[in-house]
Image (cartoon, rainbow, N blue to C red):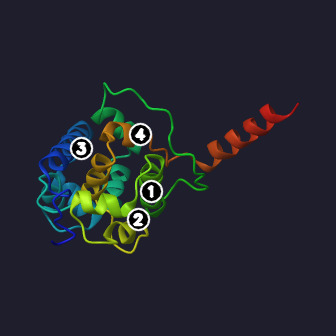
Amino acid sequence: MSEASGSGSRSPQTLADFAVIADGLREVLMRSQVRMRSLDRQQGWYSGTVSTWLRGVTALPAQRFFEILAALSIGTHEFFRIVYPKAEIPEKSNKEDFEVRDGIENLTTCLRLHLRHAIRSRGRMQSEIERKVGWTPRYLSTVLAGRRPLSLLHCLAVIRAIDLTPAEFFLSLDCERSRGESKKTDDEDRTLAKP
């Protein structure tokens, strides 16, 4: 079985989850009055690229997803509040510290780390998820290590395989804290810790 088209990456549940995110992106595009063709041109992508991603014809790479949000001047948390407006915001499950939370590459790295943390915190093994999703052995390891591109379909397949909802996962994602906010929080923590 091909790892790119594993049953979990294209399962009905994963595709339904992706459709919700794609609808959210369409809504944000409409609110911003940006046409998909204009976004393609602005980003230097082939004409119709955004459209094929949002229809699920080709997998939307996580990096490109973050580039779309940046082009529309919307943060990930703000976007996922639009996608999942009625979902309760979970406690921040990501205990790992991300020094710099700006830049598309760092956002993609943060997403990989958040996914890895979610897997560990649910007590799952990567090999177990690969079997459940239908990927070849060590495929997930190469995706999480950054040796293969991470797509939103990958994320959604893994999220469902560890019995989380996309809202729980994405609303606990915190990759965009600026350097100033990070320093402020660290200073506040030190102040509170003093006797």
Q: Earlier in the sequence, mark 3 or mark 4?
A: 3
Residue under label 4: 77
Q: Is residue 27 left or right of residue 102?
A: left
Q: Amino acid at mark 3?
A: Ile
| Distance (Cα) linking label 1 and label 3 | 21 Å
Q: CA distance from mark 1 to mark 2?
A: 7 Å
Task: Tell me if 15 is positioned left or right of 32 in this view.
Answer: left
Residue 190's place in the image compared with 88, above or below, is below
Q: Which residue is mark 2?
A: 144
The quadrant of the rendering that contains the N terminus is: bottom left
Residue 60 visible at all:
no
Image spot of residue 119 (x, y percent): 42, 52
- Distance from disc 3 to disc 2, alpha carbons, whole Å, reads 21 Å
Kind of element beneath mark 4:
helix
Tag 2 or tag 3, which sits nearer the N-term? 3
Q: Are marks 4 and 1 in contact (CB under 8 Å)?
A: no
Which of discs 3 and 2 lies nearer the camera? The answer is 2
* In front: label 2 or label 4: 2
- Note whether 96 is above or below 46 in the view shown: above
First in sequence: mark 1 vs mark 2: 1
Q: Quadrant of residue 108?
A: bottom left
Marks 1 & 2, CB-CB < 8 Å contact: yes
Q: Which residue is located at x 50 percent, y 47 percent?
A: 176
Q: Which labelled disc corresponds to residue 116?
A: 1
Q: Tell me residue 76's x, y (percent).
A: 39, 44
Residue nearest the viewer, comparing 169 with 7: 7
Front of the two marks 1 and 3:
1
- The reply to whether discs 1 and 3 touch (Cβ–Cβ < 8 Å) is no
Task: Give the quadrant of the C terminus.
Answer: top right
Q: Position of residue 190 (x, y in %)?
A: 79, 39
Q: Amino acid at mark 4?
A: His
